[in-house]
Image (tube, rainbow, N blue to C red):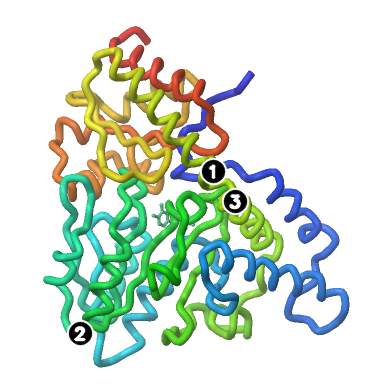
Amino acid sequence: MKRFIYADNAATTKLDIEAFEAMKPFLLDEYGNASQPYAFSRTAKTALKEARATIADCIGAQLEEIYFTSGGTEGDNWIIKESAFADVEKRATITSQIEHHAVLHACAAIERLGYPVAYLPADCKGVIAPEKLASYITGKTRLVSVMYANNEIGTMQPIKELCTVAHSHGALFHTDAVQAVGHVKIDVRDINIDALSASAHKFNGPKGVGFLYVKRGTKLLPYMDGGAQEFRLRAGTENIASIVGMATALRKNCELIEESTLKARQMEMVLLSALDESGIAYNRNGTNQIPGNISLSFRGQSGEAILHRLDLMGICVSTGSACDSVNTEISHVLQAIGLDESYAKGTIRITLGTHNTTDDAITIAKSIIKILQKKA
Ligand code: PLP
């Protein structure tokens, strides 16, 4: 019997068992510092190199284009802040109104220092139009940063087109791909992207570790000053166990991507069909959603109340972005897509992952129906 149904995989995911097993030796016996020259550190050094190669391979990058970080927040801060400081002639940044706070607050920080930032609007489905970007960009823009997939409503952006617009104006293009890496196929070479940030705990890896991809030849200033780790650009003794766990989880997720996508789409369909059959009206937010992301708005309801009722029934969902669970105001994403307040307040986010089943999807739907029909 399951203790609860976890359906908040956009907030974090369960650690993959193979990733856990791969991490264990580096937590116990192979504790050598990868920077040391003696034989005992060789295993750690080799593991670091292999993990970098695995991750590079999963996204179509080269080994020396992968920098290990403490997660998505660090990758976003690194590229946004260091890009602003890198070129006195080009100090401007463009991002979107629907980014995660890791991007928005990093942008606010550079704005406070006098570096200009423009915020692209999204349409009612959460899409950032490439034509809009073309109308915002100037010769002073050094970096455009638009997320791959939105964490609240799941919308995936036309990343390749946005990237092309940025390049045609001489700007670099970064994407916060925290919600996408390990969930959809990404080939950085094909998109021709300059930078991408990712986080292991969103793809069944451990928490507190991630990576930043930066295309070879792109000027990148160090974010953490100190030792010579990460090609002298990100100082600090490497967390080998977590890096190995991240690489193992990513490789596994990428190998199973087609299977997982089919399963996620089926779970979405089952859940939505059950709601449709009940006659309960709802708005599904977003478009071209990342597999498993279902953002639903029930008019005149309270998303908070639904979340707590589901919690009492052993079901974990979210009202919006997990990083904002203390903030009960309407999220900046729902505001940016212009969702009417009567719907926005009644929004819940269900994110189904690799450990969910169609039975979970049915139970979630039935529980929502009970709550909204005031039978629970
Ligand atoms: N970017 C997006 C789109 C996210 O969803 C998150 C986490 O929810 C982050 C960045 C932050 O990632 P991390 O928790 O690894 O710092």
Q: Amino acid at mark 1?
A: Thr
Residue 255's disc number: 3
* Residue 154 location, quadrant: top left
Q: CA distance from mark 3 to mark 1?
A: 17 Å
Mark 2 or 3, nearer chain start: 2
Residue 351's disc number: none
Q: Percent position (x, y) of residue 39? A: 88, 78
Residue 140's disc number: 2
41 with respect to 174 (left or right): right
Q: Quadrant of the C terminus?
A: top left
Helix, strand or loop at disc 1?
loop
Let me know if residue 114 appears in the view: no
Q: Percent position (x, y) of residue 108? A: 27, 68
Residue 13's disc number: 1
Residue visible at 40% across and 23% down in the picture: 270
* Residue 232 location, quadrant: bottom right
Question: What number of labels is visible?
Answer: 3
Q: Percent position (x, y) of residue 354? A: 55, 38
Q: Percent position (x, y) of residue 134? A: 16, 71
Could you tell me if the residues under marks 2 and 1 are in contact, i.e. CB atoms within 8 Å? no
Q: Quadrant of the N terminus?
A: top right
Q: Amino acid at mark 2?
A: Lys
Q: CA distance from mark 2 to mark 3?
A: 41 Å
Mark 3 or mark 1: which is in front?
A: 3
